[in-house]
Image: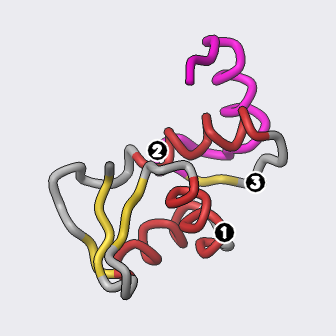
Amino acid sequence: MMYTFTEKEHVITQYFSSLEPLIMRQFPSKQKRIYIALTMIIDCFDKHKKYHEKDVNAVLRSIYDDHVTIRRYLIEYRLLARTKDGALYWCI
């Protein structure tokens, strides 16, 4: 999915209070904005590492309080994968 620079800038100013460290103030409701936010969030993970669920939760909790919603969307949008038992996660 492609998006314009202005759309990304809008998401940054509207939904994030900080980029270093990444802190989200509000979760977007529109699909395109959700995707843009998720692509920013997935960059907080090492692409070559597998994570335990508690480690994924810790990273996501540092970004936004509702880490469960973000984790679910990362999986739904196929940015994050997990084992069937949910024990290990990795970036796609």
> Is there CB contact under 8 Å for labels 3 and 2?
no
Q: Is residue 2 magenta?
A: yes
To which residue does mark 1 refer? 69
Which amino acid type is marked by label 3? Phe
N-terminal of the two: label 1 or label 2? 2
Query: Which residue is at 56% across, 24% downward?
Result: 1
N-terminal of the two: label 3 or label 2? 2
From the viewer's perspective, is 34 left or right of 44? right
Q: Secondary structure at mark 3?
A: loop
Which amino acid type is marked by label 1? Thr
Residue 22 against residue 84 in the figure, above or below: above
To which residue does mark 3 refer? 27
- Res 20 label: 2
Instruction: Give the x, y percent position of residue 17.
Output: 68, 46
Q: Toward which corner of the image does residue 18 lie, by quadrant?
A: top right
User: How many numbered marks does the figure carry?
Assistant: 3
Q: Secondary structure at mark 1?
A: helix
Q: Residues in magenta?
A: 1-22
Cα–Cα span, label 3 and label 1: 9 Å
